Amino acid sequence: MSQLSLKRVEKSFNEAHIIKGIDLEVSEGEFVVFVGPSGCGKSTLLRMIAGLEEVSSGEIEISGKVVNDLPPVQRGIAMVFQSYALYPHMTVYENIAFPLRVERLPQAEVDQRVGAAAKVLQLESRLQQRPGTLSGGQRQRVAIGRAIVRQPKIFLFDEPLSNLDAALRSEMRIELMELHKRLGSTMIYVTHDQVEAMTMADKIVVLDAGVISQVGSPLELYHKPDNIFVAGFIGSPKMNFINGTVTTADGTTATIDMGALGSISLPRQSRAIAGQSVTVGIRPEHLHLGEGEVTFTVTPNIVEELGIHTVTYSTLPGGENFVGLFEGDPDVPEGKALDVSFALDQVHLFDQAGLAVY
């Protein structure tokens, strides 16, 4: 049985329909990431699970029990917000212990739970300090500690790392993944950063305008996106898209005319139909310098030399932006034509509705 189950969950604010019928199953111990652009409804959905927003329709079940009408404190969840929300006049110990004080637990149990959380989060030497003396990462750990001591069934994280700088975000991602392994608890994490989603999640839920666009493991979404939205959202730099027309298709092969770029023949089963307009997708990291199975000539307008890899930005004859990601620091001057190539088995194909057909 799923630990968390959402059944046709919807949310409206007056005339604004924000969540449009979400069905989702989360198993015990999973690390699930809600990801999507700003305004897609991911934080609203998390707040509904927490009980901070009312459900307009549908059901939310936790451990088999419908919790729609239960207050947050009775749902067995703990939430960590983007803001640390620490009490500046309290010590780290008292900040972590605060929810236990509200429950009026015995001092011995408070000491035990706070001590255990501090050990897990490496805050033992900071317990008598106040938040103002801590770094941003340490403050976020205190906020997480305050959630841990409640011993919840499910942890909810609402963009908890967005206030940190890039280096600290990377460190905290690793700490959260290690924390998940140590605790074995169910965690639901909201972010707009697809790199966070790819590196942290057991399962990613991609949201688009209040609906689930696709659910799957990070590599499932990367290699087999169901639609053009997921294909463009998962991966950095984003997938290249080229307009084309299917000239022939028999179910096992399809030939795509890409105008000035020529034609390609895709040698595997597809739902492409002769005459239909399509979008060809190829990831920047699947491109190679020089000739290959399919070769284009492009002229980079901008070249980013990052040491570990080089990124080129070009414009195709049809006006599409075209990005290449190449290992190391090859000699790729700006304004000079060069050949780039890719393998046919790396190509994605989408119909006019944006659905994958290949």
Image (cartoon, rainbow, N blue to C red):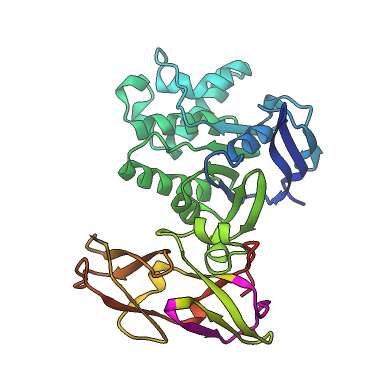
**From which residue to which does the magenta span run?**
260-277
How many numbered marks does the figure carry? 0
Residue lying at 74% horizontally and 45% vertically, measured from the top left: 5
From the image, give the main secondary structure of the stretch colored magenta. loop
Residue lying at 54% horizontally and 73% vertically, measured from the top left: 244
Instruction: Work out whether residue 297 or residue 221 is closer to the camera in this orientation and state it.
Output: 297
Instruction: Work out whether residue 338 or residue 344 is closer to the camera in this orientation and state it.
Output: 338
Q: Is residue 16 magenta?
A: no
Q: Is residue 245 above or below residue 10?
A: below
Q: Is residue 34 above or below residue 160?
A: below
Q: Is residue 331 above or below residue 20?
A: below
Q: Position of residue 11 (x, y in %)?
A: 72, 34
Q: Position of residue 71 (x, y in %)?
A: 72, 24
* Relative side of 216 to 96, left or right: right
Whether residue 129 is visible, yes or no, is no
* Relative side of 313 to 149, left or right: left
Residue lying at 53% horizontally and 53% vertically, measured from the top left: 201
